[in-house]
Amino acid sequence: MVVRVLGSPFQLCVLLCSFALCAYAGVRLLDGDWVLIALWFVGAAVVHDLVLLPLYAGVDRVLVKGAGRRRAWVNYVRVPCALSGVLLLVWFPLISGRVSERYAGVAGQSAEGYLGRWLVLTAVLFGGSAVVFAWRVGRGRGSG
């Protein structure tokens, strides 16, 4: 039995280019203080697996059990929570204001305002999810 891994030569080319780009980024990333960078990656994996994963899995379990038989709205809470959480994790230094003066020198802009923007974006995500949920519930009642 032959297993076809790649669909076309174009996919192979794109895959090889992405590997080359990742290798280049890794070399550039580890060019500086590679011990601290490696420690940060290991620490991030450990914190995620031992702290964050049980935390958000537990919250999700409570949410699902609290919903009981009416689970239709659970995904409309999960998705904005997940997106907001990922944005918080990625932009945490800027949202918390814990950046060095070096950031302003490199980026050319201040780190102020990220907390407000993240809160607004979180509100928009939850608001949009609520609107979609209300629309789908209304559409379901209108046709039934």
Image (tube, grey):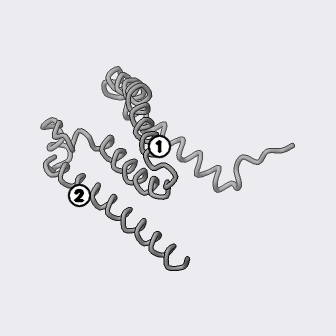
Q: What is the quadrant of residue 99 in the picture? A: top left
Secondary structure beneath dot 1 equals helix
Who is closer to the viewer here, 121 or 129?
129
Secondary structure beneath dot 2 equals helix
Q: Is residue 113 left or right of residue 144?
A: left
Q: Which residue sits furthest bottom?
A: 142
Q: Is residue 134 above or below residue 47?
A: below
Residue 81, position in %: x, y?
A: 37, 49
Inspect the image, locate mark 2, and give the three-letter code of the amino acid beneath it.
Answer: Val
Q: Which residue lies under the disc numbered 2?
A: 120
Residues packed near mark 1 inside 10 Å, few (<14), some (14 to 19) or many (20 plus): few
Who is closer to the viewer here, 141 or 19?
141
Q: Is residue 120 left or right of residue 15?
A: left
Q: Residue at x 54, y 41 (%)?
A: 19
Q: Is residue 19 left or right of residue 109?
A: right
Q: Which residue sits furthest front?
A: 69
Marks 1, 2: nearer the viewer: 1
Residue 21, position in %: x, y?
A: 48, 43
Inspect the image, locate mark 1, and give the three-letter code of the amino acid beneath it.
Answer: Lys
Q: Residue at x 59, y 45 (%)?
A: 16
Q: Is residue 141 left or right of residue 15?
A: left
**Label at residue 65:** 1
Q: What is the quadrant of residue 30 in the picture? A: top left
Of callouts 1 and 2, the N-terminal one: 1
